[in-house]
Image (cartoon, rainbow, N blue to C red):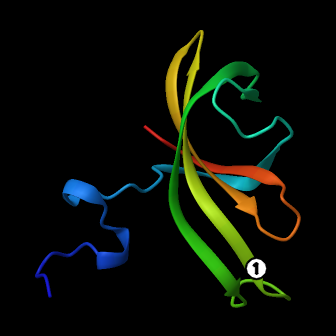
């Protein structure tokens, strides 16, 4: 057991928590294939996916909606003309659709 104020479920390798610093009001659907080299548009800017990192899985979570939700959350490292960005997204395991839910500054 640790005395740290950070909950253990947010801890990652080397003790760094990877949490978004900005959440979107509504998840933004991404229509591009989720792969290295894929392109997507965020805030009217085009980005290329440079890296994908799995974060965690939710399986049959019911407390925030009418039916159970199963999602794979991941981090997308993006590069664009305005610079680099880390986006926090998820894949809906039922539909296979991809959404961006937040960013990390």
Q: From this viewpoint, which residue is outermost toward the left?
A: 3
Q: What percent of the width, then of the height, locates residue 73?
A: 60, 60
* Lateral position of residue 74 relative to residue 60, left or right: left
Residue in the image at 52% along x and 55% along y: 54
Q: What percent of the width, then of the height, locates residue 46?
A: 72, 19
Q: What percent of the width, then of the height, locates residue 69?
A: 76, 79
Determine whether 68 is above or below 80 in the image: below
**Which quadrant, please, contains the C terminus?**
top left
Q: Which sits in the foreground, 63 or 72?
A: 72
Q: Rate crowding at label 1 as few (under 14), some (14 to 19) or many (20 or more) other CA atoms within 10 Å.
A: some
* Lateral position of residue 10 relative to residue 37, left or right: left
Residue in the image at 77% along x and 68% along y: 93
> Which residue is disc 1 drawn over?
69
Q: In which quarter of the image is residue 33?
A: top right
**Which quadrant, please, contains the N terminus?**
bottom left
Residue in the image at 57% along x and 53% along y: 74
Determine whether 94 is above or below 31 in the image: below
Q: Quadrant of residue 70?
A: bottom right
Residue in the image at 77% along x and 51% along y: 98
Q: Which sits in the foreground, 96 or 9?
A: 96
Q: What secondary structure is marked by label 1?
A: strand
Q: What percent of the width, then of the height, locates residue 64?
A: 71, 84
Q: From this viewpoint, which residue is outermost toward the top?
A: 81
Determine whether 4 is above or below 36 in the image: below
């Amino acid at each position: 057991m640790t005395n740290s104020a950070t909950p253990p479920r947010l801890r990652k390798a080397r003790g760094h928590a990877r949490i978004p610093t900005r959440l979107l009001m509504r998840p933004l659907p991404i229509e591009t294939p989720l792969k290295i080299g894929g392109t997507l548009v965020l805030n009217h800017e085009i980005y290329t996916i440079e890296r994908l990192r799995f974060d965690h899985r939710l399986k049959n979570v019911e407390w925030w909606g009418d039916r159970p939700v199963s999602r794979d959350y991941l981090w997308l490292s993006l590069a664009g003309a305005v610079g680099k960005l880390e986006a926090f997204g998820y894949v809906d395991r039922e539909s296979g659709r991809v959404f961006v839910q937040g960013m990390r500054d």
